[in-house]
Amino acid sequence: MNNRKQIPFSKEQLEQIATAHPTPFHLYDEKAIRENARAFYRAFSWVSGFKNYFAIKACPNPTILKLLKEEGMGADCSSLTELLLAEKVGFRGEEIIFSSNNTPGSEFAEAARLGAVINLDDISHIETLEQSAGIPELISFRYNPGEARFSNAIIGSPREAKYGLTRDQIVDAFRIVKGKGARRFSLHTMIVSNELDEDCFADTARLLFELAVKIRGKTGIRIESINLGGGIGIPYLPEEKAVNFDRLSAKIAALYRKIIVPASLDPTGVVFECGRMITGPYGYLVSRVRHVVSKYKQYVGLDSSMADLMRPGMYGAYHHITVPGKEEQPHDRIYDVTGSLCENVDKFAIDRPLPEIEPGDLLVIHDTGAHGYAMGYNYNGKLRSAELLLREDGTAQLIRRAETVDDYFSTMRFPGAPVKL
Ligand SMILES: *Cc1c(COP(=O)(O)O)cnc(C)c1O
């Protein structure tokens, strides 16, 4: 995938969309999402039963989820409401994986009701699961390699991470669930996040392939599917390069031939749980400029805020900005681009070179298709934006309306007012 940071719509098209749907809104590019999904699946066509379970937390919108289901994806859920959303969209049985941590028994029961693949994060959860839902036929464990594995800055050192079973626990865990009646087994890990280096995922594959061979040797258990987790990154910076699916797949295939095949474990499934790279680059936060003001610095104030996109304020993350219609103008102004929260971190960009901006201009913030709307919140009484889908025919479809004042007040109970039951 290229990383030219071009927008897939013209200024005129965007103005037209904004007439029907007031800014701010997140706009998702259906065609690009589908093409990317197909490229990912094509690259892994050598795997029997290849699947990406889309991590719902990245973009919990039913229209987007349905579109990904049409492309053959499953759903990766980590909470009760994500399970219910997957069910409402039409995901069934093993199309759903329930990969959560610190999980209440009631959520295991719900996952079991749906027939989802249950991925246990801790050896003690075998008992929680047994008491709440019984031991299912198919069971998965999340592995944490501890010091056996390098770290990635975002997730941190595996040893410090709260997730997964340790090297000492993982083999016993499979033995225990087999003794309790489980008949099918899969293995999972997730050790990196927003990673662009294909070798990191090859290392993860090697780790799990070798572990599957070890589990076979020690317990006789055959792992039917290896889940490499999510964490494939996206090039937020214009100078970064997207992960090359064909290269990634070739590296994993080479390890499969080297480790899985000689151990007579072929076919073993290989699956992912990617969220970010599936929708991230294909979503745009579209905002209008309210004010351009001059203090000690120059500020562009938008009609959106950190409540619509947390990443810059929370992580100092870079999100590219395009001013439609002014792409070719010299980027000779330096602005801080801000929202309107009473928080000084509420900035989409700091010291960003941009063309001269005037009130009323539309601004497009890139790469908001994952952890954009999803991380939104109501701080400062901000109402969450709408979400739109840019269809393949160029029209825009409302796929979630903006919140209203009534939505905001709907959970409040005013003192003295009668409580409606
Ligand atoms: C967040 C998460 C994912 C998805 O990660 P991305 O970085 O969006 O690909 C997958 N699996 C688990 C267990 C997660 O917590």
Image (cartoon, rainbow, N blue to C red):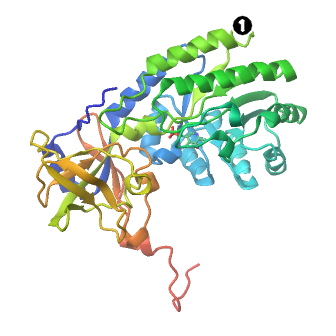
Quadrant where the N terminus sits is top left
212 to 156, vertically: above or below = above
Q: Residues within 10 Å of mark 1 (few under 14, many from 20)?
A: few
Q: Which quadrant is the C terminus positioned in?
A: bottom right
Answer left or right for 353 relative to 151: left
Q: Which of these two is toward me, 207 or 399?
A: 207
Q: Mark 1 — residue? A: 262
As drawn, the residue found furthest toward the left would be 329
Query: What amino acid is found at the position of numbered circle 1 in the picture?
Result: Pro
Residue occupying the point 80% across, 51% down = 132
Residue 145 showing in the rendered view:
no
Percent across and percent down for residue 195 are 48, 34
- Viewer-closest of 327 and 226: 327
Horizontal and vertical percent for residue 165? 75, 39
Can you tell me which quadrant of the image ligand 1 is in?
Answer: top right
* Number of numbered discs visible in the structure rendering: 1
- Rendering quarter of residue 283: top left
- Residue 190, given in percent of the width and then of the height, sits at 61, 36
Residue found at the very far top of the displayed protein: 262
